[in-house]
Amino acid sequence: MLNSIALIGGTHGNETSGIQLIRNWQKSGLPERFSSLNVTCDFANPAAMDANVRFLDEDLNRQFTAERLAADNPAREAVLAKSLNERFGPKGNAATDFFIDIHNTTSHMGATLIVLEADEFNTKLARFVKDVMPEANILVEDEKDYASHGYLCTVGKKGVMIEVGAQPQGVLREDVYQLTQTMAEAILDFCVAWNTDSNSMDSLPACEAFRLGYEVKFPLDENGVRKAMIHHSIQDQDFTPLLPGAPVFRGFDGSDYVWEDDKETYPHFINEAAYFKLDVAFATADRIEF
């Protein structure tokens, strides 16, 4: 039974779809069909929102490991993380049954549901969302156990992220906003169904999903300076198969760097602006049934 649900925007202050959706629902209330749910709609990092930046000192969405929550760190997001953990958690013994955190990406990922576990709850959620929203992508990040993730949503007993793009940082696109609202409502519809009769979803078929692999960095020279950019053939092709031998990067000298793995992968977060300073070009994934 999901007795308490947190629906949160503004974990990153320049990801505006979730911020606007929460503002609208705070003003007008949730749609009537969700009246049976106990949902808290709120913002995670209002100061970053006011500044229209991802974060002020450190990424809030990496603060929620046990080690970081216990550390004496004066960074504003580290201090804020402790407060959010007290309010919605504490992590590992949470007052919040289900935490839904809304994000945007500059990558062309469409509406992506990120789940962190392959248990019954998350499997049924993924299948439900995919059934009512066929255009959705399901990304499974279970490469580590749930508690080891540093994501804000893990302060809840269960937690997921909505990731929708492509949208530039700090602006609002109507099509991306509509996808965000549609996915948020699909998840809340699932919550109603779960609370009413979770067995009713046993007949949902397995769905296509993508299991996170690893990060791929931009090519760097001996001085750590970037030598190439994303090749045009994979730009905006998130979750499209990248085949062995296909171009991945275009060097500034005009040469191409090809995918040298011996199997295909499904890149995502391609050319994500927030990861640019980390030299992360994209993440890989395997296509699975979930």
Image (cartoon, rainbow, N blue to C red):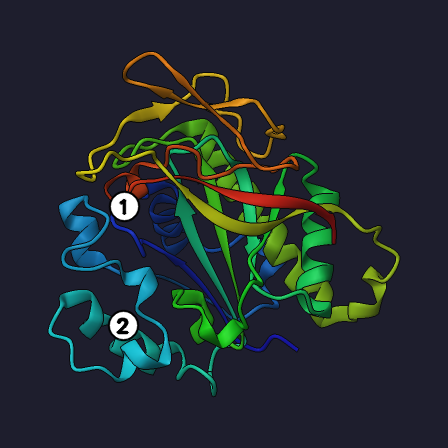
Specify the farthest residue to the top. 254
The residue sitting at the left extreme is 74
Query: Could you say whether the residue bearing mark 2 is in a helix, strand or loop?
Result: helix
Counting every numbered tag in the picture gives 2
Locate residue 80: give its quadrant. bottom left
Q: Is residue 107 visible?
A: yes
Residue 44 seen in the figure: no
Between marks 1 and 2 in the image, the one whose residue lies nearer the viewer:
1
Q: Residue at x 23, y 42 (%)?
A: 277
Q: Mark 2 belongs to which amino acid?
A: Ala
Is 157 above or below relative to 201? below
Q: Quadrant of the N terminus?
A: bottom right
**Is 104 positioned to the left or the right of 197 in the image?**
left
> Which residue is under mark 2?
81
Q: Earlier in the sequence, mark 1 or mark 2?
A: 2
Q: In the rendered image of this protein, does residue 187 appear above or below residue 265?
A: below
Neighbourhood count class around disc 1 (C-alpha, 10 Å): few under 14, some 14–19, many 20 upward: few
**Disc 1 target residue:** 278
Q: In what element is the residue under mark 1?
A: helix
Q: Where residue 259 sits in the image (x, y, percent)? A: 53, 30
Name the one closer to the observer, 262 or 3: 262
Q: Pointers 1 and 2 in contact (CB under 8 A)?
A: no
33 relative to 65 in the view: left or right: right
In the picture shown, does residue 14 fall above or below 196?
above
**How crowded is the residue under tag 2: few (<14 C-alpha within 10 Å), some, or many (20+)?**
many
Quadrant where the image shows the C terminus:
bottom right
Q: Position of residue 140 (x, y in %)?
A: 60, 55
Q: What x and y, as percent, mark residue 130?
A: 70, 45
Q: Quadrant of residue 196?
A: bottom right
Q: Residue at x 46, y 83 (%)?
A: 95
